[in-house]
Image (tube, helix red, strand yellow):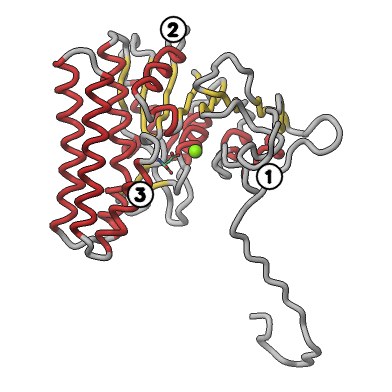
Amino acid sequence: MIVLKFGGTSVGTPQGMNQIREIITKDNNKKLVVLSALSGVTNTLVEIGERLRKKEYELALKVIKKLQKRYDEFLEELFESESFKNKASAIISESMNFIKSCLEKPFTNLIDKELLAQGELMSTNIFNLHLQEHELNSALINALDFVRTDAFSEPDEAFINKELSDILVKQPAETNLIITQGYICRNAEGNIDNLKRGGSDYTASLVGAALNADEIQIWTDIDGMHNNDPRVVDKTFSIPQLSFEEAAELAYFGAKILHPSCIRPAQKKTIPVRLKNTMKPEAPGTLIHTKEGSGEGIKAIAAKDGIVAIKIKSLRMLMAYGFLR
Ligand code: ASP
Ligand code: MG
């Protein structure tokens, strides 16, 4: 089994969804596909939440209407038959009705988390229907049923292993494309929660580790991990191979291509992680698979903004308890 995760820019347009379908149907091997929300949607949901918290209902409604329009246009372009378009729009209406209902009740943290989950719930439903319109054997499984965090807000890996395999054995043998949401989960209390922004990569890695996948592929809009940040530096190039540690370090220190926690579950089980470009599937991308780094010199440079460094210099403070605290 291979786990493939497609990010927001990959699922964010009908052409992107068509492209993903082509990538995952190159062969008939079983695949588990993890999707993000359409690009920009999680940001929009965050904005709606902020407006609601400040009781700016008019402004919130304006943003909701714009979001509705985006989905209407998306479905119109993606689906060929009226019947699939209608099925998709019924599902999108459920989410949009939930979002609109937030205007009418006190805005709590619980509602906020449920609001943020709508992006992935909608993208996966749309994509699964898209596969079915193309008569492919796909099934949508809900990440809220098997991704859970523990009392320390860390993924409960034992729970994920057990619940996911229970769900998968119930799938018909001919179902070779399983679709699920990245990012969303339940917490220790059973409430809807998430793995923090960019968390779909983390979901893919957790799920890949739970299934002992042959490979975890992270598909995005750049052909792998570059030796420097291409948004800032000209003429960067992708690095063909990295060790788990090198990749984790680059992700942690600012390489936006990967969620910083995403490497660990794969590393623990030595499952290769491949970074690929959805719009350039033939490009080799980056393969993260070795324990130790190889080669000489510096492989890549990452940068992080908004860091505050505090330097503390002690005066002569003999017996001055509590200074550092
Ligand atoms: N949709 C979520 C976000 O924008 C999770 C993800 O895309 O990885 O942060
Ligand atoms: Mg991402």
Secondary element at tag 3: strand
Please state which amino acid type lies under the numbered disc 2: Asn
The residue under label 3 is which amino acid type? Answer: Asp
Marks 1/2: CA–CA distance: 38 Å
Residue depicted at x 62% and y 47%: 254
**Which numbered disc covers residue 16?**
none
| Residue denoted by label 2 | 28
Q: Is residue 131 left or right of residue 250?
A: left
Which residue corresponds to mark 3?
193
Q: Is residue 98 above or below residue 104?
A: above
Q: Is residue 20 left or right of residue 214?
A: left
Eye-nearest disc, 3 or 1: 1
Earlier in the chain: of badge 2 and badge 3, it is: 2
Quadrant for the C terminus, please: bottom right
Give x and y (percent) for residue 36: 40, 34
Q: Residues within 10 Å of mark 1 (few under 14, many from 20)?
A: some
Residue drawn 22% across the image and 64% down it: 55
Who is closer to the viewer here, 9 or 191? 9
* Cα distance between the residues tagged 2 and 3: 34 Å
**What is the CA distance from the residue labelled 3 to the residue labelled 1?**
29 Å
- Give the amino acid type for the residue marked by disc 1 in the picture: Ala
Q: Residue at x 24, y 28 (%)?
A: 73
| The quarter of the picture showing ligand 1 | top left
Using the image as rendered, state which of residue 213 and residue 79 is in the foreground: 79
Q: Which mark is residue 302?
A: 1
